[in-house]
Structure formats: structure tokens, C-alpha cells
Image (cartoon, rainbow, N blue to C red):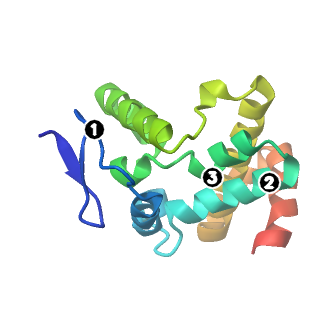
Amino acid sequence: MRGIGLKKSVLLDFSGDWPENLSIDTFLLSLSQEIRFSGQTKNWSVLSHSILCGRTAKRFTVSKNFIKYCYAHDLGEAIFRDIPTPFKVLVGLDSWNQAEKIVVDKLFTYYNIPRIEELTKQEVENFKIIDECACNIEAQHFFPSSLELIERFPLIQSFAIFNMLDIF
């Protein structure tokens, strides 16, 4: 069997069917224990990031598909961990990305989560802004010396300040 174990003693077989009634709590528990920025923040999890993105999306739209995608966009990291994208690109993790896509597609199908390809062009652009702003807010909070990242992008700076007043 080709599969992987999760935090709640669940074994997922990637080549076969998954157990019926597999609770999303299994994945949320894993995300709550997966620390952002390769473990450097100690107390800010991938789940926290996902909640930040979902709550931000709820402020700007009523599209349930878009909001659901924003909350769930990192669900695959419950299995594949939080490996920063620049690192994936640097080491050429093509096979890793392919495997991650297969599992994420299966997760999204299982839980009826829209894929990014199912969002409108505007929703995709909005998601990229929300995700990038969330990342920059987190970076500024946990790594104050990274402020220059936010200062280089005026749109992100204004969005970040707006959200920081409500979040932190």
C-alpha cells in the first residue's frame, strides 16, 4: 500500500479509496501543528494562516466557493508540510509538486472544495493578493526586519495596515 499516516492514526492510501466519513478534523489537526515559515515562528500554524485568508475573503465577497477555497488553499500541507515555494523552485521539486497536486485534487474532491481553476479570473487575482498580504503580515509580525518586503509594495502595505488593525 502506498500511503501516509496522519496525526490521528489515519492511514491514507493514495492508490485506492479513502475511508468513508474521513473527518476534515484529521487534516485540521495536522495543519494546526504545522508551523509556518519552516517552523521558525513557533506559534503560528498553517491553520492560523488559512483562517486569516478565509476571514479576509469573507470581508470582501459573498461567494461561498471563493471563501471555501481561501480557507482550504493549504489543506495539502497537512500531508506535504509547509515547504516555502521559493525553496521548491530552487531545488526543482517537480515530482514533489506533481504528487502534491494529485493528493490536493483528491482532498478537494473528497471535501467538495473548489479548485483554483474553478474560480473566476478576478477571484484568482483576489486570492493571490489575500495570500500574499497574509504572508507579509505574518512576516512583519514574526520577523520585524522583513519590513522592507512590505515597503516595496504600496498596495500590500496599505492592505496590511488595514488588516493589522483588526487582526493583531
**Neighbour tally class for label 3: few under 14, some 14-19, many 20 plus, Cα within 10 Å:** many
**Neighbour tally class for label 2: few under 14, some 14-19, many 20 plus, Cα within 10 Å:** some
Relative placement, left or right, of 147 versus 97 is: right
Residue in view at x 23 percent, y 35 percent? 16
Labelled pair 3, 2 in contact (Cβ < 8 Å): no
Mark 3 → mark 2, Cα distance in angstroms = 10 Å
Q: Is residue 109 visible?
A: yes
Residue in view at x 42 percent, y 59 percent? 23
Q: Closest to the observer: 13 or 104? A: 13
Mark 1 → mark 2, Cα distance in angstroms = 33 Å
Labelled pair 1, 2 in contact (Cβ < 8 Å): no
Q: Amino acid at mark 2?
A: Lys
Q: Closest to the observer: 83 or 13? A: 13
Q: Amino acid at mark 3?
A: Tyr
Q: Quadrant of the C terminus?
A: bottom right
Q: Amino acid at mark 1?
A: Asp
Residue 71, numbered circle? 3
Which image quarter: residue 155? top right
Q: Secondary structure at mark 2?
A: helix
Relative placement, left or right, of 153 versus 144 is: right
**Neighbour tally class for label 1: few under 14, some 14-19, many 20 plus, Cα within 10 Å:** few
Residue pointed to by mark 2: 58
